[in-house]
Image: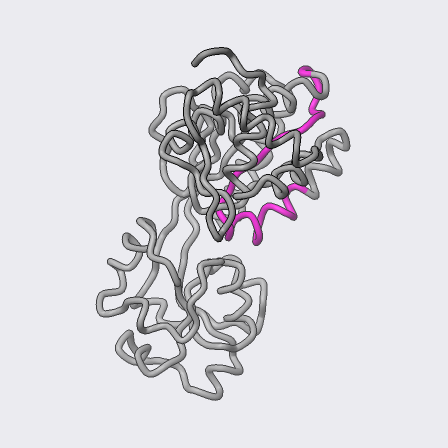
Amino acid sequence: MNSEPSWDVYRSFAAVLRSGSLSAAARALGMTQPSIARHIDTLEAATGGALFVRSQRGLSPTDRALALQPHAEALVAAAAALQRTAQGRPDQPEGVVRISASQAVGVLHLPAILARLRQTYPGLVFELSLSDAVDDLLQRRADIAVRMTEPAQQALVARPVGTLQLGFHAHRDYLARRGTPADMADLHTHDLIGFDTETPFIRAAMRHLPGFDRSAFALRVDNDAAQFEAIRAGFGIGICQTVAARRDPALRHILQDAFALPLRMWVVMHEDLRHGARYRAVFDALADALAAIAER
């Protein structure tokens, strides 16, 4: 590096990586396109090489840019965490808390929990990051996470909060129209709802369903909320949380003895945050509420 670029340069670089164009990065950051271009020029001069090449799809990162990407993203995450921490009083449950969770937990359970939290602590503001990828708490991409895998890092405070059961469900109208499968083999004659893209979690789950793969599904979608709504709409048979399905009296839990998939949950945060009042309040509320849901 010939000189040390400012923080704004790295933020612009990360925005261009995410958006794939100067104009989109400028809109995201509330800046002008020439300003973003100058920042990229500055970083290229400092690193001694091109970071992007123009293509039909916009700006494509070079190998040099891809090597810098995780470090730039870490800087952006750290800056956002610093801003969140600076807001509000550390001894009071107020300020911004960023929560990471899976799509299913984030859509089906967290809105009601956060609504109650906001009523109890009006000074809290929530940022909700929904993804089935695991956000890095050590780099403060999130303050608190609800995870479906046990955390391995030593610098995290983790509390197990129980197990969500997954099972096959269908709308009563679909079953009246197509019949209720008597066993797993009968599923092959039904309209099944499942994943589109195979992930490590999906591969692990599919071990419980020998003989089934992506080709068996009449509807393929990677969004858990969309799968659940397709079940509720009567499209066919799909896998969802039994506790969520019980909220809709029209849904039926089928093949209970033949298939059940337990999904353990943990609420996790970085150990440096455990003495902050807002983080502790949100951590405890999430853990208690999710434990009650898992128990049901």
Classify 122 as above or below 24: above
Extreme residue in the top direction: 3
Residue 103 magenta: yes
Does residue 105 lie above or below 25 as drawn?
below
Q: Position of residue 178 (x, y in %)?
A: 43, 87
- Residue under the image location 71 percent in, 25 percent down: 94
Farthest residue in the bottom direction?
177
Left or right relative to 166: residue 6: right
The residue closer to the viewer here, 20 or 52, is: 52
For the N terminus, which image quadrant?
top left
Is 145 located above or below residue 163 in the figure? above
- Residue drawn at (39%, 36%) of the image: 62
- Closest to the observer, 21 or 83: 21
Residue 108 at x, y percent in the picture:
57, 54
Which residue: 72% across, 37% down? Answer: 118
- Residue 286 appears in the figure: yes
Residue 60 on image: x %, y %: 45, 42
Give the residues in magenta.
90-114
- The one nearer the camera, 132 or 48, is 48
Residue 34 image-quadrant placement: top right
Query: In this rendering, would 83 be left or right of 291?
Result: right
User: In the picture, residue 93 is in which quadrant?
Assistant: top right
Give the percent coordinates (x, y) of residue 248. Answer: 58, 67
Asked if the magenta segment contains residue 152, the reply would be: no
Q: In the picture shown, does residue 210 fall above or below 127?
A: below
